[in-house]
Amino acid sequence: MRPCSPRAARLSSLASILAFACGGASVGGAREVIQNKGSDTLVNVAQAWAESYSEVDSAVAVAVSGGGSGTGISAMINGTVDIANSSRRMTSSEIGAARANGTDPVEHLVGYDALAVYIHAHNPLDFLSMQQLAGIYGDDGTIERWSQLGIEMPGCPSDEIVRVSRQNNSGTFAYFREAVLDNYDFKLGSHDMHGSKDVVDLVAHTPCAIGYSGLAYATPEVKTPCLAASDTCVAPSMETALDGSYPISRPLLMYTPGDPVGEVKEYLDWVLGEEGQCIMLEAGYTPVAPVECVQ
Amino acid sequence: MTRDALARSRDFDRRGAAWYMDRAVTLFVFVGGISAILFIVGIFAFIAREGFGFVFTEFDAGEFFGSIAWRPTSMIERTYGALALIVGTASITGLAMVVSIPFSLAAAVFIGEFARGRTRETLKVLVELLAAIPSVVWGFIGLSIMNPLIIDTFGVPIGLNVLNAGVILGLMAAPIMTTIAEDALKAVPDGYREAAEALGATRWQVIRKVVIPAARNGLVAAVLLGVGRGFGETMVVLMASGHAINLPDSVFDSVRALTATIAAELGETAVGSEHYQALFTLGILLFAVTFAINLTADVIVRGIRRKGR
Amino acid sequence: MTTAPMELFAGTPRNARDHRVEWLVRTLLGMMTALLIVPVVIVLALLVVRGGSAISWEFLTTPPVDGMTAGGILPALVGTVWLVAVALVASVPVGVAAAVYLSEYAPDNWLTRSINLAIINLAGVPSIVHALFGVGAFVLFFRFGTSILAASLTLAVMTLPVVIVSTRESLQAVPRAFREACWNMGATRWQTIRRIVLPNAVSGILTGIILEVSRTSGETAPIMFTGAAFFLPFLPQGVLDQTMAMSLHLFVIATQVPDAPDALPFGVALVLISMVLAMNALSIGFRIYVRGRKKW
């Protein structure tokens, strides 16, 4: 029935000619497309959900793209997505902008993410207080050398702390600033990487470095020290994120323009159901509530 | 008689159709011809349309050019100091030119004046292949291979720095410089060379004393276009420069470039916001500088042609 | 050293030194040229060694799975083909028309000089500025959204100079006498161009188009914000869809996907560079063939 089969795409020479003919056809096609966009923290699990959901309901395709929480939220304000992923809550000005465009954003909590501090695998540091972390990253912080933390870092003769951060409009950056720096500015000169994986990779290959990213990005090549907000130092894990004892864990959110209906509602229900939450757990994030998963 | 007239009028009609076709095509190719102008004006118009909202309100030239505090999302006070970005771009481009100018000019002289026959063709093809490697592949090489290599070799804290991005950018700018420089050498009339050789000069003397001075303007234009290329490169400086707001003291310091800042931040910025407009303002700056570079190169090249005539 | 009587200059001591200098210079320049080319070889070798193991038929024909840490690159490959094809449809007619105008019609006046300057500038504008233009013009102003259409048009504007310059060169290579002979037969300008100039230049034009394909398929910055997506579980169905693309896929895998095996980004880079180099090789081969066939 459809005027254009997917196979058309493979005929490179014809694709261009068909392109204009098919342009409109894809919109009203048999397959329902859910546009899902936003947070880089969530993008991998969102992608895993999209992949599995195509087996649950083959008539629905979920198109996932990352770019960051801001991308998803601004796309929702502009009305170009069905679900926006975000690792931070929408700001009041963003909600205002959405309402001005006639959409009323609805928030859905889909899980938690512990924001781990990453250091090189050979770094002897095990313990870090929130004040020390603020001293390293904050604009008026004075900690610039590893020796100031009382350690000698092998493979880092310069003793300099190489700060790895994220680009200034990512959700991870905003959450770290809120939770660690109390919304004060970062010190300039940090390496503002483009993705969470970029941060962990760079730390893994750079003995002098310290970085922060979602716990889901941990690899054997890096270490995640425990963090102390008060007397006790809590190691980042799914359990400590869920029970709230780890000082920097944040909600992972999905926003829909208005209450979800139809396919979007079914998809969100599935995400929050056992199967979706188990995928979340497997990807290294903390589910909304404890779930039983068979491996 | 009538038949004759009919035939003649049909003949006339046929000529008429061809004539109209000719006019139509003339119009079509004329529109195609001026499309380049339309696009360049369009590019400026569209980035200005998005960016001027910032330029005419929040923009503070003193802060923009004098401060390194690029903090467009600060909760305390949003500041838009682009000094570190400008210096970052300049330092990477500068190192790239230090790397690529001697090598590209050497390659141009060798390919144009010394190499012959098959060697020459092979070298030209290889230089072209150098130009064909996509920038994202170079960026990936900088990130995954050069970074650990620089850390191990020089014992510096981080390998994503001016050195990494500058060397890669130098390699990327080299083919365009080599090609244009070689064209400039080729444009020197053979009569000059023959005259010098007849006076007993060696090949190198001919090149040094005759060919290079005669091609000087073309070589300067080649260097300028290479600078333009390095200045505007995005993916390599995004992936290999360290992306840190910093005024560098040495080639081992990380920096952040204008282009990389746009690439990293545009995606997450709400359309029409102050930050979004500020990024387009960086785009206006980039456009203006490359326009100036290309204009200068063109004036210099046209200078040679007039002299050649 | 004895002076060879028949050679006027070569034997004098001063000239012997000159020749030594000449030899030194020649060697030095040759070595510097080689140093410029060595990195290409190293890069290619590295990609083959570290990414070769990732390449298989399945790699090319299946979509990514397991959060893009396994599986293939089919949607990215197909997406790049779409982007390039649509960009060609948009840029080739305009580019060829521009080249025909410049080569066959344009008088030597300020307008022609402005056009030439605009072409140089279009080629020199940074790719990220083209991306900004794409966002401002195609995504927002013309309301194409982030789509293949918006991304391809951005690429088309960006690579237009490649088509114009190479087409103009091959048109100008057709001897003037051919045109004059045709005009003398009473043909109009367009008839001459269509029957004589274009057929004689067609291989040169194709060379330019292939080169444009090579440029277009490797570009990343212009499509980041105009139409390329992080992940899509299906192939694009039309020009208003988003798409994955090889270049962005490499960037994403290298910077954003956790736990990807080491060979994966190298494999993606290897496929991307193979596509680009194959196109370039085709273009170079075409050029040599054309040159060999030329009868004038």
Image (spheres, coloured by chain):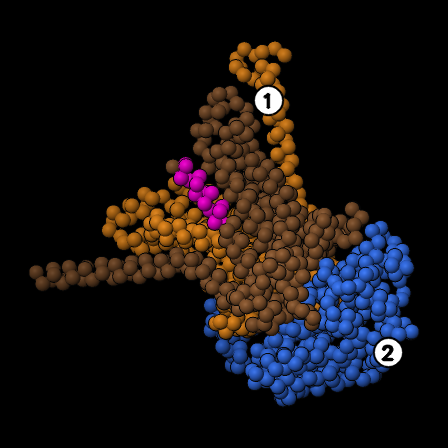
The answer to whether B124 is drawn above or below residue A149 in the figure is above
Q: Residue at x 62, y 60 (%)?
A: B63
The answer to whether A27 is drawn above or below residue B21 in the figure is below
Whether residue C213 appears in magenta in the rendering, the answer is no
- Secondary element type, mark 1: helix
* Residue type highlighted by circle 1: Asp
Whether residue B305 appears in magenta in the rendering, the answer is yes
In depth, the one of A108 and C223 nearer the eye is A108
Q: Residue at x 66, y 40 (%)?
A: C35
Count of numbered tags: 2
- Secondary element type, mark 2: loop
The answer to whether A241 is drawn above or below residue B100 in the figure is below
Is B25 situated left or right of B227 in this image? left
Is B91 situated left or right of B179 in this image? right
Q: Which chain is orange?
A: C
Visual hue assigned to chain A: blue
Q: Which chain is brown?
A: B
Image quadrant containing the C terminus of chain A: bottom right
Q: Main secondary structure of the magenta part?
A: helix
What x and y, as percent, mark residue A99? 59, 84
Which mark, residue C18? 1
View extreme (left): residue: B1
Q: Residue at x 57, y 67 (%)?
A: B58
Q: CA gap, disc 2 to disc 1?
A: 81 Å
Q: Residues within 10 Å of mark 2 (few under 14, many from 20)?
A: some
What x and y, as percent, mark residue C226? 56, 67
Q: Residue at x 56, y 82 (%)?
A: A101
What x and y, as percent, mark residue B49? 50, 67
For the magenta stretch, what is the residue range?
B294-308
Find disc 2 in the rendering and name its residue: A245
* Residue type highlighted by circle 2: Ser
Chain label for disc 2: A
